[in-house]
Image (tube, rainbow, N blue to C red):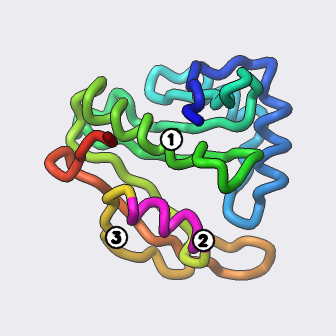
Amino acid sequence: MKPSIQNSRPEDLDFFRQLEIQNDTFVCAASADEHRAFLQSDNARHLSIFDEHNRLIGFMLLIGVQNPHKSLELRRIVLDQKNRGYGRQALRWAKKYCFETLRFHRLWLDVYTDNARAIRLYESEGFLREGTRRECLLRKGTFQSLHLYAMLEKEYHPAE
C-alpha cells in the first residue's frame, strides 16, 4: 500500500482541519489561515496523502525548503487511517525528498513525549533523539514536553 503524495489544494483545507481536530491528542491544530499561508509559502510544502484508491487520507507539512542551512522540518503528518503503513510510507517520502531531491543535510521533527506510536516509527526509520524540550507547550491546561528527533544525510539509507 504505497500512498501517492501531491501538493495540497485550498479546497481540501476543511478536511485537513477536521483531521487535526480528530487527532488533537498529538497534533496542534493550525487555523485555516495558517494552512493557507503554508500553501502559499515558498518555504513550505503542504502535501496531500492519497491511498491506493486515490482517496484523500491525510496531509504532511514540511517547513524550511529554502533553509540556507539545509535543515528541513517535518512539521506534521496527519492521517485518518492508522496501522495501514501510510505514515511510514509518508515518512520515507519525506526522507527521500529531503536528502535526494533537496540535497539537504538534516531532517528534523519534534514529537510529544507520550506519543509512543510515532516515537517507535521515527526510531525504526533511523531518526535519533537529540533532546527534550521539557514542558514547553501548554495544552488543555497541562504543560507538555516534546522530544526532538533528527536524521543527518550520512544516516539516510533509502528504503528497499
Check disc 1: other Cα within 10 Å, few if <14, some if 14-19, many if 20+.
some
Q: Quadrant of the C terminus?
A: top left
Label 3 amino acid?
Arg
- x and y percent of residue 100 in the render? 26, 28
The correct choice, above or below, for 84 with respect to 139 in the image is: above
- Which portion, as a residue range, is magenta? 115-124
Label 1 amino acid?
Gln
Q: Tell me the SS state at disc 2.
A: loop
Check disc 2: other Cα within 10 Å, few if <14, some if 14-19, many if 20+.
few
Q: Quadrant of residue 61?
A: top right
Check disc 3: other Cα within 10 Å, few if <14, some if 14-19, many if 20+.
some
Q: Residue at x 49, y 29 (%)?
A: 44
Q: Residue at x 44, y 55 (%)?
A: 109
- x and y percent of residue 14 in the render? 85, 32
- Residue matched to label 2: 115
Left or right of residue 50: residue 75: left
What is the chief secondary structure element of the magenta stretch?
Answer: helix
Label 2 amino acid?
Asn
Q: Please tell me whether mark 2 or mark 1 is closer to you in this view.
A: 1
Magenta residue check for 23 = no
- x and y percent of residue 113 in the render? 54, 76
Marks 2 and 3, how far apart at CA: 14 Å
- x and y percent of residue 78 in the render? 67, 46
- Residue matched to label 1: 89
Marks 1 and 3, how far apart at CA: 21 Å
Q: Tell me the SS state at disc 1.
A: helix
Which comes before the other along the chain, label 2 or label 1? 1
Q: Which mark is residue 129?
A: 3
